[in-house]
Structure formats: structure tokens, C-alpha cells
Amino acid sequence: PSSDTGTSLKSVFWGTFVHSTCNEAVQVLEDTAVGVDHEGKIVFIKTGEDVQRVSQEVGFNAADVKQLGKHEFFMPGMVDAHIHASQYSFTGTALDLPLLEWLNTYTFPVEAQFEDPEFAKKIYSQVVRRTLRNGTTTACYFATIYTETTLLLAEIADRVGQRALVGKVCMDRNDGASYYKESTEESMRETDKFITQLLGKGYPLVSPIITPRFAPSCTSPLLEFLGKTAKNNDIHVQSHISENRDEVNLVQQLFPDCKSYTDVYLKHGLLSRKTVMAHACYLSDKELEIFHKTGASIAHCPNSNISLCSGMLDVSRVMKHKVKIGLGTDVAGGYAPSMLDAIRRAIDTSKALTILDPKHQTLTFQEVFRLATLGGSQALSLDDQIGNFAVGKNFDALLVNVSVPDGPIDICNEEDPKVRVQSYIWFDALKHLFSSGDDRNIVEVYVAGRRVVPFDNTS
Ligand code: GUN
Ligand code: FE
């Protein structure tokens, strides 16, 4: 601490902080002050000292000091590692078909409407605001094949204040719905254009991500081009892998020279530490080893996996292979645009696996909390910037209150002498939040130090 931190200090948040570190899935920091500068970066974290003393040491008199109430705590903003912004309009419906038929019947007709900027603007504004309201401070988005409206999604996320990776979907093969695809040349040209234009905007919160929809919707020349483009520009890649059995078989037919689904992406240069692949329910040990070696990560999408009857990912197995993993809502294959729901479904899936095989190691709520925050940041290779509370990282945070009037949970009886700042109480608070909490318990949301929820009406 020195007076030069004081000069750029914008806010100080004082109270209880709950987050994950590499060593501890849930760490509770009580009576802690976190200082944030004008860029939204954390400049100090001080525990167990009174406000006055820290205030004098670092001179934050001029800063905006926010002291938390007794039932409140800060947790890191959640990372949705896989969500289709363009599918938000039919969230919660159309979950009666398996993946490949679901795409042809419901998904492609809707995505094809996103050529229309008015429609796109309406839906993209809704999905950004809804997910932010639900505590998603970082989202990894699929948009559609249309460059112009995908740029619109990026603009909306940056303006409303959500950190995002935004992908223009690439598909030069679509036998089931030929009205919704590009030529190979078009997909290449538009991808270049999308990346150049988005980088040119200089949005502080939003970056482009290369997005081959999945192996069945791309030809080999397109995949190769996308791999090269990702490498040359050092940018992120996202796609789907091994979501359902029919899809795995289809990939084997379409790419007979490849040893596995993972091998398709590997051969085309698409696996790196900046790659995130959704689902991964049916990967072999060999494939998981390739993920580990290349540094590619997995977005576990438990709601979608169950809703489309796709499969059940064994997260413990993925972790044993030391493969990075985060959680995704996969709207609209998943019916809930909420990371609290993704946490819940991840726990349910793990318990279902334990029912099927009592030897299965059930995920703890602590581990799942880490997946939704730090794990997601690692999966997106953003853990140098976000994921937990550490000096130098962005202040992306949720102010949680587990005792809001008329809220879904109230573990904190005013008369109860147990209700003090004590770590075990905070563990209970967290468990309640995950099992029955909702956005009413997320009273404020911060991204890069800026309060973005409650919304200000101009955004
Ligand atoms: N695989 C290819 N496209 C999609 C999609 O839009 N949703 C899901 N869940 N899986 C896919
Ligand atoms: Fe998906």
C-alpha cells in the first residue's frame, strides 16, 4: 500500500468476499476491503483491519466506499462458457427432439432470421441483459452466420457492460437446411471481415472468437482456414464436440481419415489453449489426453445435455485428466439462461452418475462453484484477467444478499444469534444460493469495476 494507489483509486468494497483459488475451492474472506482503480482493476485486498486504518494507509478518502450489509457478500461474476445468443428467443421450448433433428427443425429456421438487424437487436439486447441480471459477467457467445448482426451483438454487450467473446458462426455444409449456410469462400471472407472489424472497434470488454459450428457443418478446407486464422491472429476458438452419439457417428462418416472427433479438430489446427469445446460427453481417454496436451478446454453444459437427452459428462474424469473445464448454459439446448441453474444441473448430473455407479465421485458444491467462476475463466484462458479476487485482476463481481425481502431464501433469521460473520454460515449461504436462490439474490453486478446491475436506463 502506498499513496500512489490512492490517486487512481475509484472504489473500495468492504465486507465478506467468497471466491475460489487454485488451492481452495471456496475461500471466505471476512472483514475484507477490496480497492478498485479507475480501470476497474483490483489494486489491493486487505483483511481484518478496520476501515479507518486501511483508509489512512492507502488514502482512499476520496474513493467511493461501499460497506456491505450483514447478509451480503461478494462473489466473482460467473462465466458462461457456452451460450447461443441467437437461440434466446426460443429458450424453454422445443426440447422434444434429439440434437441433429432439433437443429434442423427448430434452430436453423430461427438463426436464419438474424439477417434482420431489427430482430437481432431486439433478441441480443434481451439475452445480454437477462444473463447479466442473472450474474453472468462473462459470456462466450455463438451468434449466427451473419457478420453484420454478429457485430451488433458485440456492440450491445460492450455498451450494456458484459465481458464477452463473440463468434460469427461458420458453416459451409448444411444438408438438413440448405437455406442456412455459406459457401466456403464466403465463410472465409466473412470471418476475416468479422475479426478485422470487431478488433477495429477497440471494445474494452469484447473480443472475437473463431466459431466453426461443429465438424458436421464444416468442410475440411474451411476448418483448415479457420485453424490458420486462429493461429495467425492468436485468437480464441469455440465449437461443439461429442455431444450425442448420432453426432459422433456422423463425424466418423464425414471424416473417415480422422481417428476420432477430437482428431478432426486437432488435424485442422483448431486445438490450443485458447480453444473451448462444448459438451464432450463421449470423449475417450486418448481424446482427453489431446485436450490436456494442447491446453484446449471443455464447457460442460448439463442442462442442455439432459434436455436434449444427449449424455452425461463425467466432470471428475475430465479433472483427473487435468483438462480445463467451465460451465455453460447452452441456451437454447439448455432451457435456462442462468449460471445458477448450470451449477444446479452440474450437481444433479454428478449425483445421477453416482446413482448409476456408487463408486462415482460426486462433485461437491465447492467444486461446482469453482467451475462457474475460476474454472470458466481458465477454460476461456482469461484467468489472468478474471475468475476470482486478486490484485491486478478486473473487479467482475456479484453482490449477493441471502436475505432479501420476499426473496426465495432467508437463512438469516434476525433473532438468531448464529447470524454473525462466520465462515460456516457463509458456506450455508452459498449452498442455499445454489439450491434455491435466483436473480433476486443478486442485488448488484459489477464488470471491470462498473456497476452494470441494476441497469441504468441509458444502456
Ligand atoms: N451442435 C451444433 N450446433 C449446435 C447448437 O446450436 N446447439 C447445440 N446444443 N449443439 C450444437
Ligand atoms: Fe451449443
Image: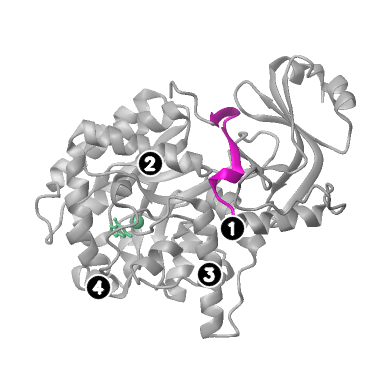
Contact (Cβ within 8 Å) of mark 4 with mark 1: no
Badge 4 crowding class, 10 Å Cα cut-off, few under 14, some 14 to 19, many 20 or more, is: some
Badge nearest the viewer, 1 or 2? 1
Nearest the eye: 423 or 44: 423
For marks 4 and 2, give the CA distance: 35 Å
Q: Residue 153: where, in percent of width, then height?
A: 33, 35
Instruction: Identify which residue is drawn at 80% across, 37% down.
Output: 32
Badge 2 crowding class, 10 Å Cα cut-off, few under 14, some 14 to 19, many 20 or more, is: many
Element assignment for label 4: helix
For marks 2 and 3, give the CA distance: 25 Å
The label number, if any, that marks residue 252 in the structure image: 4
Residue 348 vertical position relative to residue 12 in the rendered view, above or below: below
The label number, if any, that marks residue 348 in the structure image: 3
- Can you say which quadrant of the picture contains the C terminus? top left
Badge nearest the viewer, 3 or 1? 1
Badge nearest the viewer, 4 or 1? 1
For marks 3 and 1, give the CA distance: 13 Å
Badge 1 crowding class, 10 Å Cα cut-off, few under 14, some 14 to 19, many 20 or more, is: some
- Residue 414 visible: yes
Q: Is residue 390 left or right of residue 455?
A: right
Q: Which region of the structure is painted magenta?
A: 437-453
Residue identifier under label 2:
127
Give the amino acid at mark 3: Asp
Contact (Cβ within 8 Å) of mark 3 with mark 4: no
Residue identifier under label 1:
436
Element assignment for label 3: helix
Q: In which quadrant of the rendered view does residue 218 lie?
A: bottom left
For marks 4 and 1, give the CA distance: 42 Å
Q: Residue 180: where, in percent of width, then height?
A: 14, 50
Instruction: Identify which residue is drawn at 54% across, 72% down.
Output: 350
For marks 3 and 4, give the CA distance: 31 Å
Element assignment for label 2: helix
